Image: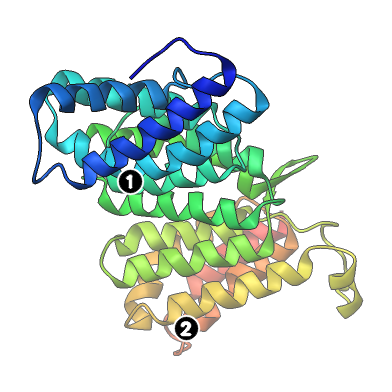
Amino acid sequence: MRNQHSEKDDVKYFVLNTVMTEIFLHLSKLICPPVLFEKVLEFLEDSLLGKVCNDTLCGKAVWEKHLISLLPFVPKLVSQVAVAWKSRLLQAFSEAFKDCNPVSPLKLACISVLEELLVPIMWIRELPVLLILLDDKNPYYSQVVLHLLLRLGQRALVNSSFAWEYDNMQLSLQEFFGISQDDGPDLEQYVLFRIIEVLNSAYKSGHIQIVDHISFLITLLSRFRVFPENIVPVRESDVNISNRGTFKSLSRIVCSCLSQMGDNTLVLQMLKKIILDQMSQNPPLDNICAMLRMLITLDSKTTIISQRAFISLGNSQAQ
């Protein structure tokens, strides 16, 4: 595998070597001479690092096109080769993944390989950056990255270094999911409702404790900020000039989730004190109404919520 040639020769030899390497890797189970295998690994490493083709526009296009055909072999090789070569291939792959265009077929091919590798290396930190670069202009590519993130989360072992890396990545995803407002990030309505749906499914599957899920739902209703605030009286037309419509839908979804948790009396006993504590902090009127709705949804018997609780609530609102 030669290294020094004219521009056209570089491209020709790279294409030829790529085809030969692909054939060899397909037949490696039958024929695997150690010396030749070492040469193949060296060529694959150089290909990933972009060392085997010139930097002209034509050369780069050929490099990306033919490198894609070699990428599917990377996960298997990483699992088979010695530790030293494993490290070299992963490093070379990371460089290729990081350096290629965010919306190129090569980037997409790299993402597919990442799902098979599932190795806790530096590329996991590149995924939020990639999502932000893609923004909403490339929904298919964004969907592929999000699917990969989902698969990573599903396979991350509890208390592992990979799980720690995955958890630390969550904050950097905020910019992709949120829209900057004067008073902080505000999720798109669809994204917000989809998050609730996913978490509720996770709770039903036993992956989230009931206390944590209830706390999440209460936090949603107590911290959501309707703008403009405290319109009195509330008119139906207000939903067209603010996010009040979103909040009404959110309240309905949260109440539905709570009513499906089991015995309403027990659920109410778990969240009553938390809700009353939240309401005693004098939140905006919309939030108070939403939290009252939570109580009423679960309070099928008028004796469940004590008279003392209502007196306490009334006193806090009179202040």
Q: Is residue 188 above or below residue 305?
A: above
Residue type, label 1 = Pro
Q: Is residue 196 left or right of residue 252?
A: left
Mark 2 residue type = Asp
In the rendered image, which residue does mark 2 sit on?
299
- Looking at the image, can residue 163 be seen? no
Question: Residue at horizontal 47%, vertical 83%?
Answer: 299
The percent coordinates of residue 155 (x first, y second) are: 26, 50
Residue 138 can be seen, yes or no = yes
Query: Counting other residues with Cα less than 10 Å from the Cα at mark 1, is it few (<14), some (14-19), or many (20 or more)?
Result: some
Q: Which residue is mark 1?
A: 72
Percent of width and height locating residue 35: 12, 21
**Cβ–Cβ under 8 Å for marks 1 and 2:** no
| Residue 111, image x, y percentages | 44, 45
The local secondary structure at tag 2 comes to loop
Is residue 231 shown left or right of residue 191? right
Which image quadrant for residue 95? top left
Residue 140: which disc? none
Horizontal side, residue 301 vs residue 240: left or right? left
Q: Nearer the viewer, residue 143 or 116?
A: 116
Q: Is residue 246 above or below residue 31?
A: below
Cα separation between marks 1 and 2: 57 Å
- Percent coordinates x, y for residue 129 in the rendering: 56, 34
